Amino acid sequence: MKISHIFLRLICLAIAVGSGWFAARSYQYIMAEEDPTSRIIALVIVEGIFVSLTIYLLVWTFFYDRMENRERQRKADAERKERRKPAKEKLAEARKEQRAERNTNYILGAVAIATAIYFLTKNEWLMSGLMVVVAVYLFYKAARNIEPDIIKQKREEATRRQEVENLMETAKDDGAVIIVENVDGVTAIEDAIEIFGDEYHGRKNGRNTIRLWQLERCKYALTFPLGYQPEAPISLMWELDGQGLQPRGWFPSHRLKTQGVWTMLTVANSGATDAVTDNGCCYEDECDFRLRIHPKLHLAYQPRPNIMNDNPEKLEDFT
């Protein structure tokens, strides 16, 4: 537990104790009040506020971790739901927000004109002129349909995702796959992909797009349906290992510039990426995304799995 969390809990516990003490002391004075109406009002207001505050702070103090984990899970589920929306739906939402913004500008412009007329009847020339300027700006903004940055960003992202989805309809990946087993959920995998994506995602050609599959209850697979940069496989393996996972990947040897037909990648305890080809040649990469032959390394090659034989469930695309 973090020191800052312990400090916050102690503060809340102290406030809860103080609030409870104040509620108890107030109760004695309230019950000594002769007027029944004043007594009821004081009980409802004072006791209600401080007793509720005491209960809330006590719950927060003793169940902080559980509440924080629940909030984190809620946010993760909301983000996951947003990411998994089809590109067409996202684009429709962006267009809807754009129309709403335009109509709002028209309405505000009309209100500004009405306000200008009102000030004109009161001979408030300065305010009337100011409202006319505001109305002209709003009507100009609505007529030009100038998009706010957030809507423009959503539109561009939705359009790019639609283009990537169109590419996926005809593209065929090269069979590269990463298997991750003994995983409680997709959160750790998503975190690794998010870090990976900071550098490798966002390209218009969809390269480095990752497709996440669920093979079994605690077993997942990652593929690259639109290809990848040469250093991307090693980078993704590192990010997955950094999340406490134990990934094992298979890639065409010509993409990694190794021997044989297929190369299996793993991450050693030292953090180095180890590799072994289907003809038994071993490689290692410590930090520069380049596999070098390592004669003293002995790894056993395992055949590349065909995940399609397991009827996998496609979860989402990260692009």
Image: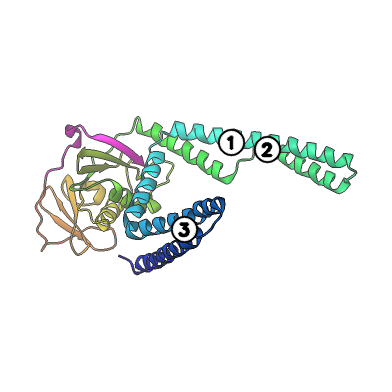
Between disc 3 and disc 1, whose residue precedes? 3
Q: In the rendering, at what x and y percent does residue 154 appear?
A: 50, 41
Q: In the rendering, at what x and y percent does residue 311 appear?
A: 20, 31
Verify CB contact (< 8 Å) between mark 1 and mark 2: no
* Disc 2 crowd, CA 10 A, few/some/many (<14, 14-19, 20+): many
Image-based side of 152 in relation to 62, left or right: right
Verify CB contact (< 8 Å) between mark 3 and mark 1: no
Mark 1 or mark 2, whichever is nearer to me: 2
Verify CB contact (< 8 Å) between mark 3 and mark 2: no
Q: In the rendering, at what x and y percent does residue 168 appear?
A: 35, 33
Between disc 3 and disc 2, whose residue precedes? 3
Closer to the camera in the image, 308 or 254: 308
Q: Which span is picked out in magenta?
A: 303-318
Which residue matches tag 2?
A: 105
Residue 98 picture quarter: top right
User: In this picture, is 225 found above or below 189?
Assistant: above
**Label 3 vs label 1: CA separation?**
46 Å
* Disc 3 crowd, CA 10 A, few/some/many (<14, 14-19, 20+): many
- Residue at 20 percent across and 33 percent down: it is 308
* Secondary element type, mark 1: helix
Which residue matches tag 1?
A: 98
Which residue matches tag 3?
A: 50
Give, as a three-letter code, the residue at label 3. Phe
**Residue 87, magenta (yes or no):** no
- How many numbered circles are shown? 3
Name the image colouring.
Answer: rainbow
- Residue at 21 percent across and 51 percent down: it is 247
Q: Which mark is residue 64?
A: none
Give, as a three-letter code, the residue at label 2. Asn
